[in-house]
Image (cartoon, coloured by chain):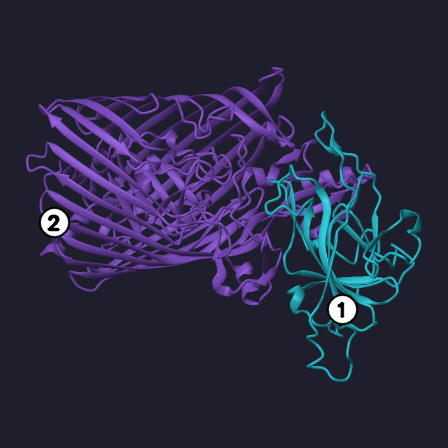
Chain colours: A purple, B cyan
Amino acid sequence: MLRIFNFLLIWPFCCFLLLAQSDSIQLDEVMVTATRTERLLSAVPMPTLMIKSQMIRQAGSTRLQDILGEQAGIVVVPQVNGLGNGIQIQGLNPDYTLILLDGEPLIGRYTGSLELNRVGTFNIKKIEIVKGPSSSLYGSEALAGVINIITDQSLRTNGKVSLRYGSRNTSDLNLHGAWVDKNLRLSLTANHYSTNGYDFSPEIYGQTVSPFSNFSLMPKLFWTPSPKHEIQISARFFKENQTNAYQVINGVDSIRVNGTGFLNDQNLQISHHYFIAPGLKWTSRLYATQYHSGTTLNKLESSELHYQDDFKQQFLRPEIQFVFSKWKKQRITSGTGYIHETVNTSRYGDANDRAQGTYYIFAQHEWDPNSKWSIVSGLRFDQNSSYGSQLSPKLGIRHQCNQKLSFKLSIGSGFKAPDFRQLYLNFDNAAASYAVFGTEVVKEQLIKLEEEGRIQTYLQPAGKMGSISPESSFAINLGMQYSLSKDLSMDFNLFQNYLKGLIETIPVAITTNQKTIYSYTNISRAITQGLEAQFNWQLNSSIQFGLGYQFLLAFDRDVLKDVQDGQYFGRNPETLVTYRIKTLDYFGLPNRSRHHGTFKVNFTSRDKTLDLSARCIYRGKFGIMNTAGNVSGVLIPSSDKNANSILDRYDDFVPGYFVFNLTVSKRLFDQWTIQAVGENLFNKIEPVRIPTLIGRTFYLQIQYSIYKN
Amino acid sequence: MKNSIYVLAFLAFGIFSCQDDDVTPQSVTSVTIKDLPGDPYTGIDPVTMRPTGDKGIFTFFSLSDSSIVSNSDSASTKWDIGIKGSTIIINGGTSGPGQGGAIVYDGIFSDLNSIPDSLSFLVDNNPVFAVDRSWYKYDPAAMVFTPVPGKILLIRTADGKFAKMEILSYYKGAPANPTVRDESRYYTFRYIYQPDGTRKF
């Protein structure tokens, strides 16, 4: 009976969405990210997570990274340069996770990770997360997973205002209004956020995080001119200003600098859905986005310019997608598009635009032969002007053994295109004892140096320089879901990611004045593997428990092999005695914790006016390597204490730590909500090694909502 | 510049005598040299921020005497190794008139009892040197050189004798956590020189 009910729900999605919105019936959720079509979450054959707006509201998180970091298997990690945080999924670096806003990619990655604080949580309807490679649908960057932030599509006229104020003079003002008519829905969301930042090292000039403020505006239009046509237009404008003051390490001295920084980001999405006939849908989309950031730093003593940086990235993508679902139990989705991307930055030595284009085509087949089986297969082909072509297949199978038990298996490959820095960087500073050239410029630079007679030695064969291909992965996810009862469910996922052709810098030549010249190449291989586990227990209508855990092993495969062969040694820095590293001594890749866990308790009063949410996050010990985090005048010390450039048991790790968060919300007179949030209640900080771990924070928020019934 | 060399010497254990009755190698001595300067810098250019004061000359060293050899003897066989910055030369090939050669070998210094007969020594052929760059690692972000542990320099000296050598630090005073602020180009190393011409230590 239930099966028939579920089956009936697969097709009329619009009705379903309306029902789900009303919250009155507990129904299965729909996910769009895993297949680019609306699919029941329970029938998605890949590991997924869904964060609903209710969870975001209960937690009171205003920063995206906070709500993400409270999920099982999602680790918020500090960036290697100490600037900002990133999201690590299945042990892969932040730049291997694709971040989408309403299905379209956010751009503007600074040294790999996106600054997630650019996205406020106020108007998020839900966040869908698919783990494992999804390049078969999304192309580059979707190796570790895809995070799709889906904003609210108000279905009734309403208005909301919320004001939050808290520690470090942080204020957050949100306005949201929606007007809904029969065929037209309009909404506007605005946000203003400002904070004084914080300082872990008052003895050093400048703050650890400088004061900043930002403003964003998000208008949306949804128009249904006829039952067969839907038009959606949404835009986003974001502007951030920073006031910077730093003590920077310059050669062997440090100097004091100050100045300003800005970050502007705009995007525009236009889509048209055309329901040609029952089971036949045509979608045209246009997405244009721009990211522009800049920093100017002057020397405090002399007011001379110390550093100036300007980075502008543009991304334009027209795309069409076709969904064919006329046959029972099958659905075919296919699409094609073109991406035009340009970068213009002072970091590449001139003011020229660097452009690249990518043509792509993808197809996917969803097949649900009976209520026990679901099979999704997909393939995507990308053709890029700088790095050539890439083929990304994927297969997912789900089997429902009985009402309580189901299994999922997904196999796929992902890739990440070389970024603009790896292609075009032109860093040759007289003050530095090294130069770094991207693969598209290294050859001409070496020829120039050769002609000037400044090359002493080449360190790589000529053929190895100047060519680069995407990094790629092959991954297996094997999952099991078991529902002990209606109220108690368990979810396990075993994963393995094989990454190859990872891009790293290599020394390519030495100049006559002993300057080492570096470029980029596909060099290393890595493996990340582990187990994700999640337990959910609804004790009664008021109390809910959630427990998440991830065990992770992440190794450089070449290092692992050399360690197994006895080719790695360590040296005691005090006694200078050398010893051999054994296989079990090797800890693995930096910035990875073997253990990560989350524990949540939610309480809702019977009349649903009082919410209490307590969360605890554990991150196990991890190591730090090759850091250049000298922005705040403090060098982040490497964990490597025995000079072998790998992490092993003799090294100095950042110890594991817990963070506790507590939120209490109370609804008054239907329309008012007061919320008190305490984050990092026990004030766990690690000032030098995790400068992004903010200390104890309190907020108070008041929200007023109006509805038109 | 004033250089101070401390020589610490002690007798190695007679670990070979019990296992090999045919040839009893001459008892050898492990020598540790601290802060041997390899053309160090003396200052920093305030404009370009590049270190200055290096003279571009090698410091020559005799392994048998554990002493510095004058630069005027650079064309002689009095020296065995020369250091300048991170470059190590051996008295042979393009570097000098001696029979010197070397190879970088992976292992533990104290565990290596003899140089395997199968190993063939390399000879300097400027700008390619027998001791390649694998003995150190340079971190461009921290701007620090680190001698790679487990890299043993197996050396044939200018007069055809054998030695094993391990570089322990590139910074003055061998600090446990060297930074760019430490004085670089000062070698601390240990070696064993076998004067009897065998490859055993």
SS category of the residue bearing label 1: loop
**Residue A21: image location, x then y, percent:** 17, 36
Q: Residue A307 occupies which quadrant of the picture?
A: top right
User: Residue at 21% across / 29% down in the picture?
Assistant: A676
Neighbour tally class for label 2: few under 14, some 14-19, many 20 plus, Cα within 10 Å: few
Q: CA distance from mark 2 to mark 1?
A: 75 Å
| Identity, as a three-letter code, of the amino acid under mark 1 | Val
Would you say the residues marked 2 and 1 are in contact, meaning their CB atoms lie under 8 Å apart? no
Q: Which residue is mark 1?
A: B28
User: Residue at 68% across / 39% down in the picture?
Assistant: A434
Q: Please identify the residue farthest to the left as the structure is shown.
A: A607
Q: Which residue is mark 2?
A: A539
Foreground of the two, B97 or A121:
B97
Foreground of the two, A291 or A219:
A291
Q: Residue A266 occupies which quadrant of the picture?
A: top left
SS category of the residue bearing label 2: loop
**Residue A41: image location, x then y, percent:** 24, 49
Q: Quadrant of the C terminus of chain A?
A: top left
Q: Quadrant of the N terminus of chain A?
A: bottom left
User: Would residue A102 be visible to someone looking at this image?
Assistant: no
